[in-house]
């Protein structure tokens, strides 16, 4: 079952056709869930103007039940059916967990989470008898702890100790145990907004809580020791016993027939329903470790009785693209774990535990859970999935959706003083004049500007895209001389780094500044023809160019190059390297230079690569101009301010000091008006901790955070900043204000054109002045001790 463009569609495993159950072009339906008995489908619908829970017959042929989820309205997520198909648990944007009886239709609040954490949720699941919910809830320490909730008593109870991070609770099908995964090394990884949370190994072990007192452990000791056979009855009676057996032979045959009849009756008897009993007293001592390797588990799911599916990723996820998931299957009877499927991005087990749905690459697949998955088997046929689209009906729905998103997600419930309902009415008449999707985004831009906040982004949707012809670029600057195009500068890049490949400096190409570009694919390159016109539709393709030291073609050579679609990475790297050389030259080799382009992956990698590579310098200039943000860069601040603590010597080699990976001298930070978000927070903290002076221009002033918004019907998006950062004096110190420099310096166009960077030059000057007043002194070691001196 899939949600696509606000419609709910069912897809057959093999036979049959894709069926659209909703067919509502002007309504958004989200988060479908199939009931365990296969009869009903639940989803959230905004048909009434606010989201409600709808329950429809899976064939789409009966009247839809519509359940009002109460006031104030909100956004709701992940409807989860109880095993008896009578109740549905779900969460909302306000951090609440609810359940509702499909017939009773009165939602019951189960609990509320403590923090808005975009990296994890409750992960709620039902007990097999539908009388308990279990979930992982945040405590004050920002770690998740396992809780259970009794529907009968309406009370929640804590299961795990709260001094470890416990997640992904699931009941076993027999109702005897509760499985979950626990980590004791989450540490800094819990700080999802902090740069210091990056790249720490996290391992989780899997445990089972025995729910009822007196029940055995699911992993009680096993033994292959031979058991004594029971002595045969009557063996000492000899022939008397045999005669007795003969005399009963006829009775035995009749008895066998009677037993066969009894067996038939037994097979007709219903299996006793599972009843879950949870004895909370002493449950902490009934938690046992399962014989499963520790790994970075991201999900647990139960299959058939005694089977557990474990989804894991690498201990330290890489930064390059989505992290693939590997699923393994644990059998409680054999106590063995085997590989099931790998390289996937989504996984779910059916209610009866017999089949699994998984997402691999662009495809979706269904496989039986009894055996290891064969890649490619069970592919769902999605090519014919279609929905009817009425653009103007969608635009009306999306217009209202956008205002709902601002109403419910913006960090300020008063929306900076804007009357949201009045604003929606004010701009509604302009909808009639919208002639295309681009117009709608323009309207969103204009109307949401009234909220007056940074990070208010709008984009995407069904905006027509013309076919793009990618022009190729060689990574060079040109000038016209002697009637030809001459290479004024060739950008080097790092040819060992795929992201910084320089076409003209590849081995065997070796084009130098001062040479001429004479031909491209046999066409003579001469002004006034635009030089870039010769490279249309060549990005990523092998082409031949002729270059040489002379404009007349003398001593020219032909080389094969692969032009780039963009030169940004090459030019940015060149700017950074030019700045590093300038700082090195102006400081006489005393100062390091590090550019921090953002406070996310790029800035983290740049800082780690270039700051620690310059350990040994006496001070540093940290350049955060054009920093476009990301996380709160506490990690960089912590690294910059570590003081020199002590030094050490060894028998051989030079003395070294602690912390070893540190530049001990003064630091100065360069800022400008193009630094924002995390690029505002970095100089703010630099100033708070009095690390050094800020040089340049006031930063952008946009210290709010965005994440986790529902997509619009056609895949477009808007944001509503849902986190705002304030200072320790209870003031909004940064948003719409920015961070002012200690020393204001403007990089005016004339000085830049003349080859100067006045901001960087001033930063070097300031740092050297501080270094002169407070030089870094590494003390000589004291005399060696003599403990035997008389």
Image (spheres, rainbow, N blue to C red):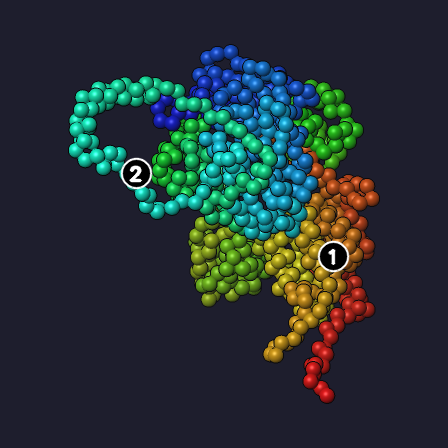
The x and y percentages for residue 374 are: 35, 39
Task: Identify which residue is drawn at 43% across, 45% down.
Answer: 221
Residue in the foreground of this view, choosing between 575 and 308: 308
Q: Is residue 663 above or below residue 34?
A: below
The residue that label 1 is drawn on is: 669
Residue in the foreground of this view, choosing between 390 and 197: 197
The x and y percentages for residue 402 are: 65, 27
Task: Identify which residue is drawn at 24% across, 21% down.
Answer: 255
Q: Secondary structure at mark 1?
A: strand
Query: Does residue 685 appear to the left or right of 265 in the view shown?
Result: right
Give the quadrant of the C terminus.
Answer: bottom right
The residue that label 2 is drawn on is: 230
**Which of pointers 1 and 2 indicates the residue nearer the eye?**
2
Q: Earlier in the sequence, mark 1 or mark 2?
A: 2
Within 10 Å of disc 2 (Cα), the crowding (few <14, some 14-19, many 20+) is few
Task: Identify which residue is drawn at 36% across, 35% down.
Answer: 370
The x and y percentages for residue 753 are: 71, 57
Q: Is residue 340 above or below residue 241?
A: below
């Amino acid at each position: 079952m899939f949600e696509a463009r606000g419609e709910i569609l069912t897809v057959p495993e093999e036979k049959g056709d894709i069926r659209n159950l909703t067919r509502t072009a002007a309504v958004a339906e989200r988060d479908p869930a199939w009931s365990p008995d296969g009869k009903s489908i639940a989803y959230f619908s905004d048909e009434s103007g606010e989201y409600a829970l709808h329950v429809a017959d899976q064939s789409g042929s009966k009247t839809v039940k519509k359940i009002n989820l109460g006031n104030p309205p909100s956004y709701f997520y992940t409807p989860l059916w109880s095993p008896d198909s009578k109740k549905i648990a779900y969460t909302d944007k306000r951090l609440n967990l609810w359940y509702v009886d499909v017939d009773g239709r009165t939602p019951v609040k189960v609990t509320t989470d403590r923090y808005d954490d975009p990296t994890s949720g409750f992960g709620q699941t039902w007990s097999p008898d539908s009388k308990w919910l279990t979930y992982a809830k945040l405590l004050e320490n920002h770690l998740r702890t396992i809780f259970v909730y009794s529907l009968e008593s309406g009370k929640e109870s804590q299961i795990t100790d709260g001094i470890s991070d416990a997640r992904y609770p699931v009941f076993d099908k027999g109702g005897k145990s509760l499985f979950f995964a626990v980590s004791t090394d989450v540490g800094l990884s819990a700080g999802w907004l902090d740069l210091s949370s990056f790249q720490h190994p996290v391992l989780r072990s899997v445990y089972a809580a025995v729910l009822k007192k007196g029940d055995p452990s699911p992993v009680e000791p096993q033994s292959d020791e031979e058991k004594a056979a029971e002595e045969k009855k009557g063996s000492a009676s000899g022939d008397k016993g045999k005669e007795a057996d003969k005399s009963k032979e006829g009775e035995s045959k009749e008895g066998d027939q009677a037993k066969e009849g009894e067996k038939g009756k037994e097979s007709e008897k219903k299996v006793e329903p599972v009843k879950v009993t949870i004895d909370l007293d002493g449950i902490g001592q009934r938690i046992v470790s399962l014989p499963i390797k520790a790994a970075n588990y991201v999900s647990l799911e139960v299959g058939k009785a005694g089977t557990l599916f474990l989804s894991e990723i690498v201990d330290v996820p890489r930064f390059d693209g989505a992290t693939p998931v590997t699923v393994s299957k644990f059998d409680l009877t054999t106590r063995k774990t085997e590989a099931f499927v790998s390289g996937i991005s989504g996984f779910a087990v059916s209610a009866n535990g017999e089949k699994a749905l998984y997402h691999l690459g662009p495809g979706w697949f269904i496989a039986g859970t009894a055996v290891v998955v064969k890649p490619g088997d069970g592919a769902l046929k999605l090519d014919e999935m279609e929905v009817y689209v009425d653009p103007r009906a969608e635009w009306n729905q999306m217009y209202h959706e956008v205002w709902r998103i601002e109403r419910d997600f913006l960090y300020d419930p008063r929306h900076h003083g804007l009357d949201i309902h009045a604003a929606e009415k004010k701009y509604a008449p302009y909808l009639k004049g919208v002639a295309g999707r681009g117009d709608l985004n323009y309207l969103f831009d204009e109307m949401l500007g009234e909220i007056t906040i940074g990070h208010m982004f709008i984009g995407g949707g069904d905006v027509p895209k013309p076919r793009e012809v990618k022009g190729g670029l060689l990574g060079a600057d040109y000038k016209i001389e002697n009637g030809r195009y001459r290479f004024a500068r060739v950008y080097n890049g790092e040819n060992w780094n795929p992201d910084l490949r320089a076409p003209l400096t590849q081995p065997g190409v070796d084009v130098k500044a001062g040479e001429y570009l004479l031909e491209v694919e046999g066409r003579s390159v001469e002004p006034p023809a635009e030089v870039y016109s010769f490279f249309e539709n060549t990005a990523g393709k092998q082409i031949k160019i002729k270059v040489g030291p002379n404009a007349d073609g003398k001593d020219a050579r032909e080389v094969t190059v692969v032009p780039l679609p963009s030169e940004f990475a090459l030019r940015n790297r060149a700017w950074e390297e030019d700045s590093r050389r300038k700082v090195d030259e102006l400081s006489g080799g005393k100062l390091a230079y590090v550019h921090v382009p953002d406070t996310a992956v790029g800035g983290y990698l740049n800082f780690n690569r270039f700051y620690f590579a310059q350990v040994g310098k006496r001070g540093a200039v940290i350049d955060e101009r054009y920093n476009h943000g990301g996380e709160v860069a506490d990690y960089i601040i912590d690294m910059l301010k570590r003081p020199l603590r002590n030094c050490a010597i060894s028998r051989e080699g030079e003395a070294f000091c602690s912390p070893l990976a540190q530049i001990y001298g003064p630091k100065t930070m360069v800022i400008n008006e193009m630094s924002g978000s995390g690029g505002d927070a970095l100089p703010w903290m630099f100033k708070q901790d009095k690390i050094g002076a800020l040089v340049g221009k006031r930063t952008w002033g946009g210290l709010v955070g965005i994440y986790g918004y529902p997509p619009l019907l056609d895949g477009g998006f808007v944001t509503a900043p849902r986190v705002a950062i304030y200072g320790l004096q209870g003031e909004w110190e940064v948003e719409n204000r920015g961070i002012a420099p200690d020393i204001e310096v403007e990089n005016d166009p004339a000085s830049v054109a003349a080859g100067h960077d006045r901001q960087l030059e001033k930063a070097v000057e300031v740092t050297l002045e501080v270094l002169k007043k407070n030089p870094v002194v590494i003390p000589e070691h004291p005399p060696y001790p003599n403990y035997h001196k008389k």
